[in-house]
Each structure stands twice: as structure tokens, then as C-alpha cells.
Amino acid sequence: MKSMLRSLRPGQTLVVWRLDRLGRSLSGLVLLIEELGERGVEFQSLCESLDTASSGGRLVFHIMAALAEFERSLISERTKAGMQEARDRGLRLGRPPSMTRDQVAEAMRESGKLPIKEVAVRYNVSPRTLRRHLRQLRQCNELA
């Protein structure tokens, strides 16, 4: 794909069957079409009947791009609202913790006797993850 795009010369037209064959996101497509236009390369999509060689084709493409951006914005707003609603109901979002509180407390006792790497292997976590859990436990103990 990259070598094909690099090989396009001014005056040529890139023809695709459908827009989704050229890019995953419409914002990426808009940037690509603008870059091609700056290089003097036209664009045509057969299924969507888009042709940037005409002013009407460019207009339709930019309208589609604006609608796609609007849709992405709505999806983002809905997602954020849904996440806030879940938090308000007391649900915990994201990945579950890799260690329970009891495991962290036990690892804290063991970390004084064994190297941190050995303790981490015992709980099937990375040393960095273990250090983070231990640091959080210490901070909680200091606040209590």
C-alpha cells in the first residue's frame, strides 16, 4: 500500500472499489486525500461515486468527512456517559487488579525476606507491578 501511494505521480488518479479499502478511519482518509491533492493526484471511489477531480466530488467527500467526525464525537460522548453511569452505580471499570489485598499484604511481609523478583514470580506478576502494589499499600497504611 505504501509503495503504491509513493509511486503515484501528478496527473494520475487513485481508484479504489470502496473507501474502506483505502483507510480504516475517515479522518485518516481525509488526510490522505488532502496529501494526494497537494501532490496533484486525484482520487476516485467506485462504490461511493466520489471523484475529487470535480469540485462536486470534493464537496461530497468533505461532507462525508464532517459527518464521520460528528459520528465519532457522538460515540465518544455516549461512551463517556455510559462509563460515568457505571461508576455512579458503583461498578469498577477497567482491568481487574492483578493481586488481592491479602496477596499484597502477604507479599509485603515476604519482600522483607526475599528478593522482589522472587516474590513477584510467586504471585505471577512483574516486579514493577509488585512494587506498585506495595507502594499503594504503604500509602494506605500511612493515611490510616
Image (cartoon, grey):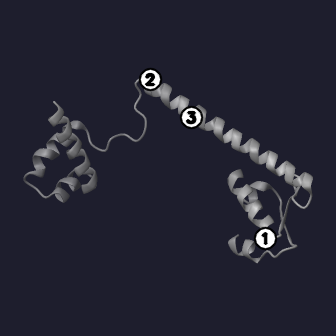
Q: What's the mark number on residue 79?
A: 3
Q: Which of 110 and 69 is in front in this view?
A: 69
Q: In this view, does 71 lie above or below 47?
A: above
Nearest to N terminus: mark 1 or mark 2: 1
Tell me the CA gap for discs 3 and 2: 14 Å
**Structural crowding at the residue carrying mark 2, measured as other residues with C-alpha within 10 Å and reported as few (<14), some (14–19) or many (≥20):** few
Label 1 crowd (10 A; few <14 / some 14-19 / many >=20): some
Compare residues 125 and 81 and report the one nearer the observer.
81
Q: Position of residue 65 (x, y in %)?
A: 76, 48
Determine whether the residue tagged by mark 1 lies in a helix, strand or loop.
Answer: loop
| Mark 3 surroundings within 10 Å by alpha-carbon count, few (fewer than 14), some (14 through 19), many (20 or more) | few
Task: Report whether 1 appears left or right of 140.
Answer: right
Let me know if residue 125 appears in the view: no
Kind of element beneath mark 3: helix
**Furthest-front residue in view?**
38
Helix, strand or loop at mark 2: helix
Q: Mark 1 points at which residue?
A: 39
Q: State which mark lies toward you, 1 or 2.
A: 1
Mark 1 or 3, closer to the camera: 1
How far is disc 1 from disc 2 in space, using C-alphas?
51 Å
Counting residues from the start of the chain, the first of labels 3 and 2 encountered is: 3
For the image shown, how many numbered marks are present on the structure? 3
Q: Nearer the viewer, residue 52 or 23?
A: 52
User: Quick check: 59 above or below 22?
Assistant: above
Is residue 24 positioned above or below 41 on the image? Answer: above
Q: Calculate the distance from the C-alpha at mark 1 to the C-alpha at mark 3.
A: 38 Å
Q: In which quarter of the image is residue 46?
A: bottom right
Q: Which mark is residue 88?
A: 2
Say whether residue 102 is left or right of residue 53: left
